[in-house]
Image (spheres, rainbow, N blue to C red):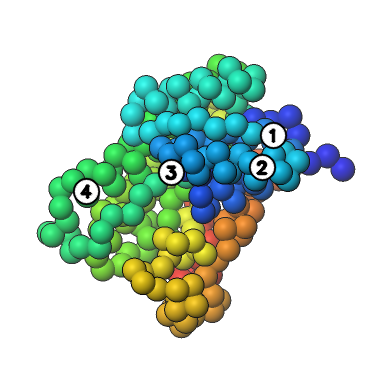
Amino acid sequence: MAARFDGAVALVTGGGSGIGRAIALAFAAEGATVVVAGRGAAGLVETVAQVEAAGGKGSHVVADVAVSSDAAAMVRACVETHGGLHVAVNNAGVFTRPAATADIPEPDWDAAVATNLTGTWLAMKHEIAHMRAHGGGAIVNVASNIGWHGRRPGMAAYAATKAAVSALTRAAARDHIADGIRINAVSPGATDTPLSMRPGETAADRDTRLAGLVPLGRVGSTAEVAAGVLWLASGESTFAVGHDLVLDGGVTA
C-alpha cells in the first residue's frame, strides 16, 4: 500500500527540535521528501540526519520566517532543490517570559508578534504564491490551545498571537480554497518537549503537576501532534477547510 505522501515535498518550519522534528520525521516515514527550516542550523542538520537514518529524504534551509526575504528564499530552496512544494507546516513559534499584560516588555511583545503571527503570515504568503501557480497544496499552521481556545495568566502575548494564528488560518482558508489550497491548523496543549517544563523542573515533575490539570491525565506526545498534522495535510481530510484541530487531552473541552 502506498504511503500517504509518496512523491510529495513537505516543508516544516521550526523543524530543528520538538514538535517540528516529530512532524518532519512523520512526513518522511510516509514517503515525503522533507525540508526543515529554522533560525539555527545545528538542530536542522540533526533532524535531517534522523530523517535519513530512518531511510527518508530531506534537506534543511536556515531562515527566519519573520523576514520576508528569508521566507521567500525558504520556499525557493524547496522548489529548486526538490522540484516542488506540496505541503507546508508552519510550526515556528516562540514563548515569551510570563508577565501580566501591563508588564510585558515591549521587546517580548514584538518578538511574539514577529515570529508567531507575522512569521506565519509571511510563510503562508510565499507558500501560497507557489502553490497557487502549481495546482494547489495543503498548509497546516500550528496554533495552540492557549489563545483562541483558552487563556492562562501571564501569557497574554503568546495567547494573543496564537489566537491570531487561528483566525488567520480560517481567513486564509476561505481566501484560497478556490486556488486548490486547503489550509487548516492544529492547536496542541502541553506536549512532551522542554517548553512544557518550568525552569528547574524535570519531566517527572511536570507530569505530576499537569496530571490533575489535563482531563486525560497526561501531557501529549509529539507523535500525537504529528499524527494530527499529517491527517489534515492528507487526502483523508479533503473536506476539512479552515479547521482548527485541538489536541490537548480535554483541557479546553
Mark 3 nearby-residue class (10 Å; few <14, some 14–19, many ≥20): many
Classify 37 as above or below 232: above
The structure residue drawn at horizontal position 58% and vertical position 17%, both measured from the top left corner, is 80
Q: Which residue is mark 2?
A: 51
Spatial separation of the CA atoms under disc 3 and disc 1: 21 Å
- Relative to residue 172, is residue 237 drawn left or right? right
Mark 2 and mark 1 lie on one chain; the one further toward the N terminus is 2
> Decide: marks 3, 4 in contact (CB < 8 A)?
no
> Helix, strand or loop at disc 2?
helix
Q: Which residue is mark 1?
A: 57
Instruction: Give the number of the mark in front: 2 or 3.
Output: 2
The label number, if any, that marks residue 109 in the structure image: 4
Mark 3 and mark 4 lie on one chain; the one further toward the N terminus is 3
> Decide: marks 3, 1 in contact (CB < 8 A)?
no
Q: Which residue is mark 3?
A: 92
Which residue of the protein is positioned furthest toward the left in this rendering?
Answer: 102
Classify 11 as above or below 103: above
Mark 2 and mark 4 lie on one chain; the one further toward the N terminus is 2
Q: Position of residue 116 (x, y in %)?
A: 35, 44
Q: Amino acid at mark 3?
A: Ala
